[in-house]
Amino acid sequence: MLRAILIALLISLGLSACSEDRDLPEPYHGLKVPPGLLESAVARENGRKLFLTSCALCHGEKADGRGVRREGLSTPPRDFTNPSWRTGTTPSRVFFAIREGVHGTPMPGWKSFSTAQTWDLVAFLLSETH
């Protein structure tokens, strides 16, 4: 009985995670995370370097939302060190926000990043290694 409940819970969690991305525009809601990316130390390190050169001014060197340019922004920069943020989002949603920006906030889109760079940044942001 317990095993059946656990299986149902895992299926439910998997389906809810997938449905979270259905509201993303094409091609983002069907985006597949490259296998092993989120666990890759190389991807996280590449993402960390890109973050420091391109994102830290607003989001802070520690990714805590306390960058030197945060003052005066209409919306505070995201604090990526918040564990509830990491558990409440998906890799596709983070990829979308990086590439397209966040509507209604000062967060611009970064389409100048390659797909690989964007995934590396996703790996870094979703890690606990800030």
Image (cartoon, grey):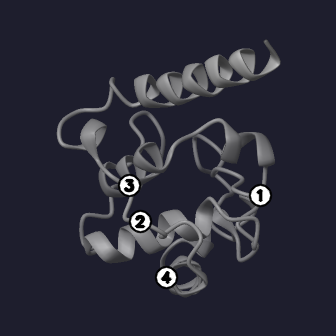
- Depth order, front residue of 73/109: 109
Q: Tell me the mark number nearer the camera, choosing from 2 and 1.
A: 2
Whichever of callouts 1 and 4 sits on the residue coming sooner in the sequence is 4
Amino acid bearing label 2? Pro
Whole-number angstrom distance, CA of label 2 to CA of label 3: 27 Å
Mark 3 and mark 1 residues within 8 Å of each other at the beta carbon? no
Whole-number angstrom distance, CA of label 2 to CA of label 1: 24 Å
- For the C terminus, the quadrant is bottom right
- At horizontal 53% and vertical 30% (from top left) the residue drawn is 14
Mark 2 and mark 4 residues within 8 Å of each other at the beta carbon? no
- Depth order, front residue of 79/105: 79
Residue at the spot of label 4: 50
Residue at the spot of label 3: 108
Residue 60: x and y in percent read 70, 70
Q: Secondary structure at mark 2?
A: loop
Q: Which mark is residue 46?
A: none
Q: Tell me the mark number nearer the camera, choosing from 2 and 3.
A: 2
Amino acid bearing label 1? Thr
Q: Tell me the mark number nearer the camera, choosing from 3 and 1.
A: 1
Q: Secondary structure at mark 1?
A: loop
Residue at the spot of label 2: 35
Amino acid bearing label 4? Leu
